[in-house]
Amino acid sequence: MITITLQPFKHNSENCIGLKFKYHFESKEIIKRMEGVRWTKTHGCFYIVYDQNTFTAFKQALAAKGFDVADATQTAQDENKKGARKNLGPITASKNSIYENFKQSLNGKRLSKSTIKTYGAFVHQFLRYTENKPADLIDATDVRLYLEWAIGTLNYSVSTHRQMVSALRHFAYLYPTCAIDPEAIFMPSKDKKLPVILSFKEVVQLIQVTKNLKHRVIIAMLYASGLRIGEMLNLEIKDFDFSRNQLHVRGGKGRKDRYTTIAQTLHPMLKNYYRTYNPKVYFIENPNGGKYSAASVRSFLRRSCKLARIKKPITPHSLRHSYATHLLEQGTDIRHIQELLGHSKPETTMIYTKVTRKELQQIKSPLDSALNELYLPDNHNKKLGLD
């Protein structure tokens, strides 16, 4: 019997219940089909949005399907009473003024809107965590306790942890009257994960199973031009130059413009899309006008992956990774790939040399070499196989 541990956590400002269990394929398939169950990549688990009635009914449904249910929500509530402070109070008026000034300072440094939103959210949460303590008296101990609380209670990933530290460092620099040394805040090292890569066949399958023309164009363009999802959604009609087969990517990461290529095989599909949808400003627009939603792209990409029977954890950025890796395998110079991707440093592009199959396929396992040598024509010992 599989044990499902129910643990409370906060996700997108909502109270949620995470489902923790030892990996078991059949159990996973049952759980993901249950009503109200969602998946969060940030926390790496299935979950439901908390509501007392829903939660009670969900526990009964799990038990009815043969699962052993371990309810850890009461333990978390007990820890909360001892000082975990899971539910934060409102921000004070004086700290709210500091928070607004902090966001204005980030805007003055010309950070991107998404960065300002992310850093602002963490600093707002931190100021709420310190409750009524005057901002001038906030020190390294408050930072340490906040990070311990956030990571332990909200189950943040390493990448989110790094964003929190960057936000707090900016806050300490921009509000020097507090007693926080920004350089003393520990920054965890990055996860050294290799990108998930699709094969040529999987890319084609993904495009073929996507029947909606707009969705198919988005998937094809993300792969064929190596675009980030934000760059794809920011494309305007004027950015396409079919005569030169070039795509002008404006305001990419780091506010950098660049040119990348348009796959010639996509010209008919792109023109068909333009005639069908007749976009006004942005090449990809939502039905009511304006930019298309990134959440919608992630949603239909998940559906297309299921239809294509692709089991890999694919995101829109995986198509960009696949584009770069396939270029490298075709012999494109790494410097040209760096320019096409808009990377500032060649070290960023070099990660694709670790996943390219071209060189790896040329490396022989010593076991293959050993068996080939043993099975040379002049070797009559036929009992050395692995059968």
Image: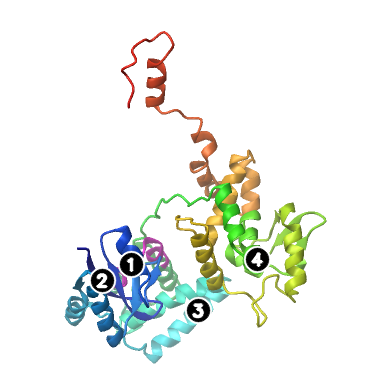
SS category of the residue bearing label 4: loop
Dot 4 or dot 2: first in sequence order is 2
Q: Which span is picked out in magenta?
A: 147-163
Q: CA distance from mark 2 to mark 3?
A: 49 Å
- Residue identified by numbered label 1: 30
Image coordinates of residue 282 in percent, x first then y, are 70, 73
- Residue identified by numbered label 4: 251
Q: Amino acid at mark 1?
A: Ile
Which label number is shown at residue 103?
A: 3
Image coordinates of residue 201 in percent, x first then y, are 57, 48
Q: Is residue 317 above or below residue 336?
A: below
Q: CA distance from mark 1 to mark 2?
A: 9 Å
Dot 1 or dot 3: first in sequence order is 1
Residue found at x 37% / y 65%: 161
Q: Amino acid at mark 3?
A: Lys
Q: Are marks 1 and 4 in contact (CB under 8 Å)?
A: no
Residue found at x 66% / y 67%: 213
Give the quarter of the image for residue 181: bottom left
- Residue identified by numbered label 2: 65
Q: Residues within 10 Å of mark 1 (few under 14, many from 20)?
A: few
SS category of the residue bearing label 3: helix
Q: CA distance from mark 4 to mark 2?
A: 51 Å
Front position among marks 1 and 4? 1
Q: Is residue 306 above or below residue 331?
A: below
